[in-house]
Image (cartoon, rainbow, N blue to C red):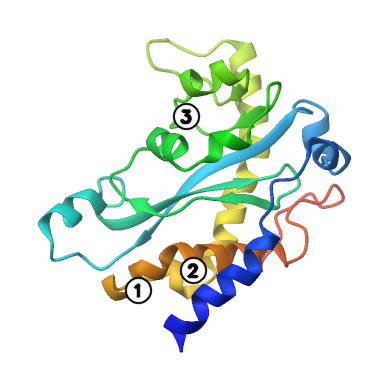
Amino acid sequence: MFISWIPLLADKLKALIIWLPRETLRDCCPESFRENYPRTTCIIDCAETFIQRPTNLKSRGETYSNYKSHNTAKYMVGISPHGQIMFISKAFGGRASDKFIVEKSGFLDYLLPGDEIMANRGFTIEDLLFPRRVKLNIPSFTKGKPQLSAEDVTSTRRIARVRIHVERAIRRLKVFKILSGTVPVSSLKLFDDILIVCSALVNLKYDLIRDTCTEEDTE
């Protein structure tokens, strides 16, 4: 039943995961973004789900995540400033870098000149975005600096304050036990469809970001 229905659900529910036009993004932009990052199109981050250790040595190596010290499936989530999941990538092996997933997932095809993307320090993708005239907003690096300038500290705090919402969206995904537990090897061929179904169900929930709410919602 599971094997039969997941692909059908994914096919029907994928229409709930759409890349919103600029006009819609601007109209729905929360005050927290409108003040400092009004041109933000998308906030991105990667998440990982534990998988059963493959018996094939090559697959075992490709899925081993040094960050998680476990074999994982890794995927990228992109949300709008108001918290809707607009992009969910296919699953990659846990060994894949954030930059590799951005480049190979098809995410770049959605971007337009003048867009701004927000991410964490791990997304060293300026060289991918520059030819498309897309700006990347990430926290300032401290490497090689005795300390951050006052301007960098302020910028980093502003970014962190609004970028946290993509982590909240990922937590909503991880509410589903299939993404918070360990996926058996036998279910990996359905994992991309599972991501679509879970993301669509997340989008059916109440708004992630509300201007009138000052604290994170509890779920």
Q: Is residue 106 above or below residue 178?
A: above
Quarter of the image with the C terminus is bottom right
Q: Is residue 201 left or right of residue 184?
A: right
Q: What's the amino acid at mark 2? A: Ile
Crowding near the residue tagged with mark 3, few <14, some 14–19, many ≥20 C-alpha atoms within 10 Å: few
Farthest residue, direction bottom: 1
Q: Earlier in the sequence, mark 1 or mark 3?
A: 3
Q: Quadrant of residue 139?
A: top right
Disc 1 versus disc 3: distance between alpha carbons? 32 Å
Which is in the foreground here, disc 1 or disc 3?
A: 1
Which numbered marker is on residue 121? 3
In the image, what residue occupies the spot 70% across and 35% down? Answer: 41
Q: Are marks 2 and 3 in contact (CB under 8 Å)?
A: no
Q: Earlier in the sequence, mark 1 or mark 2?
A: 1
Q: Quadrant of residue 80?
A: top right
Disc 1 versus disc 2: distance between alpha carbons? 9 Å
Disc 2 versus disc 3: distance between alpha carbons? 28 Å
Q: Is residue 139 left or right of residue 1?
A: right
Which numbered marker is on residue 18? none
Whole-percent x, y for residue 19 in the image: 69, 46
Q: What's the amino acid at mark 1? A: Ser
Q: Secondary structure at mark 1?
A: helix
Q: Are marks 1 and 2 in contact (CB under 8 Å)?
A: yes
Residue placed under numbered mark 1 in the picture: 187
Residue placed under numbered mark 2 in the picture: 194
In the image, what residue occupies the spot 62% across and 39% down? Answer: 43
Asked whether 126 or 4 is in front, the reply is: 4
Q: Is residue 211 above or below residue 5?
A: above
Asked whether 1 or 118 is in front, the reply is: 1
Whole-percent x, y for residue 50 in the image: 33, 63
Q: What's the amino acid at mark 3? A: Arg
